[in-house]
Image (cartoon, rainbow, N blue to C red):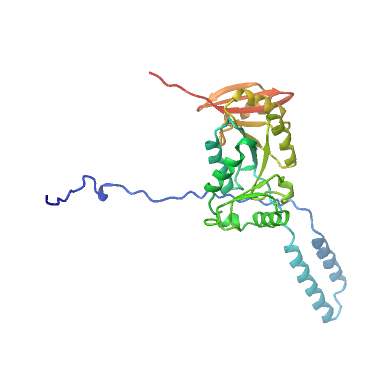
Amino acid sequence: MADTMINPVITRQMVHVLPSVIADRITLPDIIDDAIKTPTEAMNSDEKSNEAEEEDNADESEMDSEFEKEEQSEEAKEVEVKYAWNAPCMMVIFEDGDLNCALHHLVESLQDPFALDAVGVILVQESLVEEMEKRVQILMKPLDARVANHPCYKRTLLKVDELKPKTIIGPPDRVLPDATPMLVRDIPQKFLGEGPTGIITMHIFRTPLEATQIYRKEYPLPIASVSIWNERVASVYDVIGMMNLLDTFKVNCFTVDMEPIKRAFELKKYSACVHRGYHYETLPINGERKIIIYPVGTIFGN
């Protein structure tokens, strides 16, 4: 049988080839610029007033003062810059939760740790720990250079090396140790540095009650929201009621539009609505007003 040449029906010229676009989603933390005047700056201002009174000094004394000024300006540059947290989220994963979806959002935060609403701390039920650690490690990729070279992340690596806690890092054959996403076990963020650290701290709990106690170790981390993964939505309300000083809870979801419930919460009104497949409500629980959001099933028919 002779070989026959088959001409394709659809050729490359008939296809519109879209350009490859990679979204630049890396976020860097904002600098806190309301710093108090440093001692070196105060010394500089004092020296300026003294120089006005000592204009008739010899050339040697002028050279000495200029040399001192250069030294002090170098010291001022070495003053540590402070960075602000970007509304970090606390993730809580129960054994009945959807681990696949939770890991998807967790890995996003590991790769872009300074982003708005990125996970800063995670609580994992004990029965899930081993599986979760193995799976998240496989999904880790090298950090973007802007994150790996950021002073916050570099400072955290030094602290981790000093404290030597248990860590979950990327596979050594694919991820270098100085550019790896990182989960740090059983150590609060406050021990790893002031402000954002570029990593996620992880704590283990056995019971729902224990979860509501362990998160307090992370104080004063400014947790802005809580993402709870548990298919038993009714039991989640009990957990929410015991998490004091936290007001925004996203059940089985992560990045959600807050506009449908924001106004009612600000006015301290009870409200409940469904918007784009999500149930929103704000209500008082144990004397504290909370926002609770979770996805709901929707059936469309003719």
Q: Give the percent coordinates (x, y) of residue 251.
A: 59, 30
Q: How many marks?
A: 0
Q: Is residue 201 above or below residue 79?
A: above
Q: Give the percent coordinates (x, y) of residue 109.
A: 58, 45
Q: Give the percent coordinates (x, y) of residue 277.
A: 50, 27
Foreground: 37 or 199? 199
Residue furthest bottom in the image: 59
Q: Residue at x 85, y 64 (%)?
A: 46
Residue furthest top in the image: 302
**Left or right: where 1 falls relative to 285:** left
Q: Residue at x 64, y 26 (%)?
A: 236
Q: Is residue 239 above or below residue 36?
A: above
Evaluate whether residue 173 shows in this view: yes
Q: Is residue 57 above or below residue 234?
A: below
Q: Give the percent coordinates (x, y) of residue 234.
A: 62, 22
| Quarter of the image where the C terminus is located | top left
**Left or right: where 247 falls relative to 102:** right
Foreground: 278 or 119? 119
Q: Residue at x 75, y 42 (%)?
A: 220
**Left or right: where 124 falls relative to 218:** left
Foreground: 274 or 236? 236
Q: Residue at x 56, y 22 (%)?
A: 273
Foreground: 87 or 90? 90
Evaluate whether residue 92 shows in this view: no
